[in-house]
Amino acid sequence: MPTFRSLPSKVLLASLLWASTLASAVEPTETDPNVIMDAVTAQDTGDKQKSRVHITIIDKAGRERTRSIVTRAMDFDGGSKQLMLFEGPADVRNAGLLSINHDDASKNDDQWLYLPSLAKTSRISGADRSGSFMGTDLTYADMGDRDTENYDYTLVQGSATVDGDDCWVIESRPNADEASETGYVKSHTWISKSKLIPVQVKAWVLEGKKLKYTKFGEIQQINGIWVPHRIVVRTVKGTEVQSTSTLVFSEIAFDQEDVVSSDFTERRLEQGL
């Protein structure tokens, strides 16, 4: 499944923030899925970004929980960094996730989780990245970048309409190591031809015979960058919806001078809000 900053490849939030300022880089008649995916992942997702995210989680019994997060993200020579800090509720306030994502496929991405209740920072290993991120339908792997070199792509459909957008439907199949880390066997991504961003994803989960559906909505331009302001992720087993996470983004801003390299350290992670 594509990640949050660019699906299948640059950071969530800033991830879930798929973006495009060069939507004309690929002709709508293009049929080579590798050309399409390379064009999508090459898009400008913005730098020195800040946002606030409100997450509502509903389980299969209809019980509701919420999460409120503030995020910062920036690029560096060779990758990107992201810091996510929880504002609430009280039991998770000041918990946080720090992600360092490398463009070089030979380098492993790094993630650290801080839980104030344990007063401890833990490194997220590759084997743990397919696990649920703080009780949501998202995984730790969804928070990181995906390298196109680790996937085989197939054009499933040359033209499909989603909410008025003409889209390509592309199947992504990870290699064995990537599948083990992300927890996904394959995914189908609907990519808007006019915006060069994903608008819908169907992912096959490696364990539990589950499917995960992601829908990107309220897509608007900020500084020329296409940004979804609402993302709904549903986990389904058979005909039953196991859980749903709805993410609503606000206060999204790019080129913020107060987003600096010192924001993205374990020390800063542990300081909290």
Image (tube, helix red, strand yellow):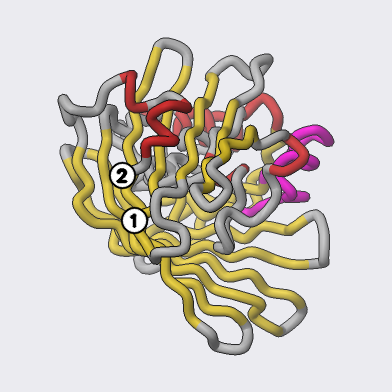
| Residue at 80% across, 33% down | 177
For label 1, the residue is: 87
Residue 90 lies in what quarter of the image? bottom left
Counting other residues with Cα less than 10 Å from the Cα at mark 2, is it few (<14), some (14-19), or many (20 or more)? few
Q: Are marks 1 and 2 in contact (CB under 8 Å)?
A: yes
- Element assignment for label 1: strand
Q: Is residue 172 left or right of residue 254?
A: right
Considering depth in this image, is 267 or 223 the residue closer to the camera? 267
Q: Which residues are magenta?
A: 172-188
Q: Is residue 116 visible?
A: yes
> What amino acid is found at the position of numbered circle 2 in the picture?
Leu
Compared with 231, 186 (above or below) is above
Counting other residues with Cα less than 10 Å from the Cα at mark 1, is it few (<14), some (14-19), or many (20 or more)? many
> What amino acid is found at the position of numbered circle 1 in the picture?
Glu
Compared with 191, 104 (above or below) is above
Disc 1 from disc 2: Cα separation: 7 Å
Q: Is residue 138 left or right of residue 81?
A: right
For label 2, the residue is: 273
**Residue 164 placed where, x, y %?**
35, 66
